[in-house]
Image (cartoon, helix red, strand yellow):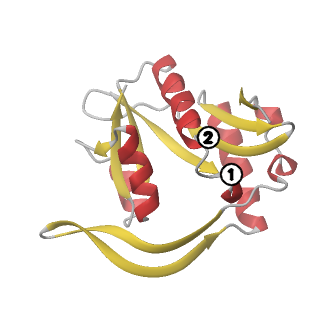
């Protein structure tokens, strides 16, 4: 079945949009930065969103659009398979960055190129906002980092202090547009 990509309006972002969307990830190894550089550490936990987390997500995505950012989705028929959001606020010493605030593909739809397509949408949105670089505060899971590095993301030259402080375990990345 053919997939279609969509730019959302604020009114299209509802809790019902995420019916059937499964944010699930079994994490076994995470990248951590220590005194001697980056290393892969053994961990074991599952990431899965609750109903309250989906409600919070809806509020955040609506705020992204209201503030001038973009939210993209990928669908099969009317079912949401993945989404990404780009914030409108610029930061960095030259205001060169905008942030990829989220990118997620439903668990059963991973490994089919949908994340890559959403990332390309996010890059297009960032360019429309006049950014030079996309900033990503990314989950440190081995698979997540492999995804970003395969796209050409590298460790950020400048860390966004609010992002780094808010998620101290995340890897701070950038992508040159």
Judging by the rendered image, the residue that carries numbered circle 2 is: 114
Q: Is residue 149 above or below residue 128?
A: below
83 sits to left or right of 128: right
Q: In this view of the protein, which residue sits in the foreground, 14 or 151? A: 151
Q: Residue furthest front?
A: 1
**Secondary structure of residue under mark 2:** helix
**Residue occupying image coordinates x 40% and y 64%:** 142
**Secondary structure of residue under mark 1:** helix
Label number found at residue 109 = 1
Q: Position of residue 172 (x, y in %)?
A: 34, 51
Q: Residue furthest left?
A: 36
Q: In this view of the protein, which residue sits in the foreground, 139 or 88? A: 139
**Callout 1 crowding tier (Cα within 10 Å): few <14, some 14–19, many ≥20:** some
Q: How many marks?
A: 2
**Residue occupying image coordinates x 52% and y 45%:** 101
Q: Position of residue 118 (x, y in %)?
A: 58, 36
Q: Could you tell me which quadrant the N terminus lies in? A: top right
Please report contact status of discs 2 and 1: CB closer than 8 Å, yes or no.
yes
Q: Position of residue 148 (x, y in %)?
A: 41, 46
**Callout 2 crowding tier (Cα within 10 Å): few <14, some 14–19, many ≥20:** many
């Amino acid at each position: 079945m053919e997939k279609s990509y969509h730019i959302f309006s604020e009114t299209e972002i509802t809790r019902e949009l995420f019916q059937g969307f499964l944010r699930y990830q079994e994490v076994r190894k995470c990248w951590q930065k220590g005194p001697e550089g980056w290393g892969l550490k053994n961990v074991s936990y599952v990431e899965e969103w609750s109903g309250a987390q989906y409600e919070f997500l809806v509020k955040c995505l609506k705020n992204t659009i209201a503030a001038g950012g973009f939210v993209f989705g990928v669908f099969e028929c009317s079912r949401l398979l993945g989404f990404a959001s780009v914030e409108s606020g610029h930061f960095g010493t030259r205001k060169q960055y905008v942030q990829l605030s989220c990118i997620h593909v439903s668990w059963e739809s991973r490994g089919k190129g949908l994340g890559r397509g959403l990332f390309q949408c996010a890059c297009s949105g960032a360019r429309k906002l006049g950014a030079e670089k996309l900033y990503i505060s990314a989950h440190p899971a081995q698979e997540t980092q492999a995804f970003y590095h395969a796209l050409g993301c590298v460790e950020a030259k400048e860390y966004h202090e609010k992002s780094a402080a808010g998620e101290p375990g995340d890897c701070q990345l950038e992508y040159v547009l």
